[in-house]
Amino acid sequence: PPAQRAVVVPPLLRGIARRGAAQQETLLGMALGSLSELPLPGSHAELEGRLPFLTDPADRALVLEWLLDLLQFLPPPAAPAADRSAEPPPGLSADAAKRVKGRLSHEEVRGELLAAKKLAACRLLGAPAGGAPVPVASSDAPAVTAAGGPATAAGS
């Protein structure tokens, strides 16, 4: 059940940036199923206990990049043309689209179910952490742009 996963998943995501791609995909898939049930912090002090994966800069960057990919993800057409079936949604690489979709069924990445997952991602991104939304970057980690790459002086 999602409520149980919401308790189990946050500690499992700690250190996700140092895991292999297959483990990351599995853990992010678990996170996707529990996004709407994650216990949001009321303050920055509660962040460590409730969402420990957001305290490590590398883990936070990976999860935020994945959330951005989720928000940009558009479902494939209902009856894709043969020549367009392998195309990723606009704004995403094929790898990013595959990482978001993971092992979800076609129905789980369409319509209201997809909208609910995106709403849960927005809920997490807007969670207060010390009076501000979840930190996107910290002084000890490179800033990450909306495209997931490092920010430059001209692009920040």
Image: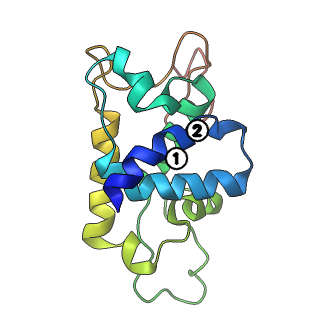
Q: Quadrant of the N terminus?
A: bottom left
Check the image and report above or below for 127 versus 5: above
List x then y, in percent, for residue 130. Answer: 30, 14
Name the residue type under label 2: Leu
Residue 62 has which mark? 2
* Residue 63 screen position, x and y as percent: 52, 40
Q: Is residue 90 placed above or below 151 in the rendered structure?
A: below
Q: Secondary structure at mark 1?
A: helix
Disc 1: CA contacts within 10 A as few (<14), some (14-19) or many (>=20): many
Q: Amino acid at mark 1?
A: Trp
Res 42 quadrant in image: top left
Q: Is residue 99 left or right of residue 41?
A: right
**Relative side of 143 to 127, left or right:** right
Circles 2 and 1: CB atoms closer than 8 Å:
yes
Specify the label residue 66 is tagged with: 1
- Report the residue at 52% width, 15% height from top: 138
Residue at (31% x, 24% y) in the render? 133
Q: Nearer the viewer, residue 154 or 26?
A: 26
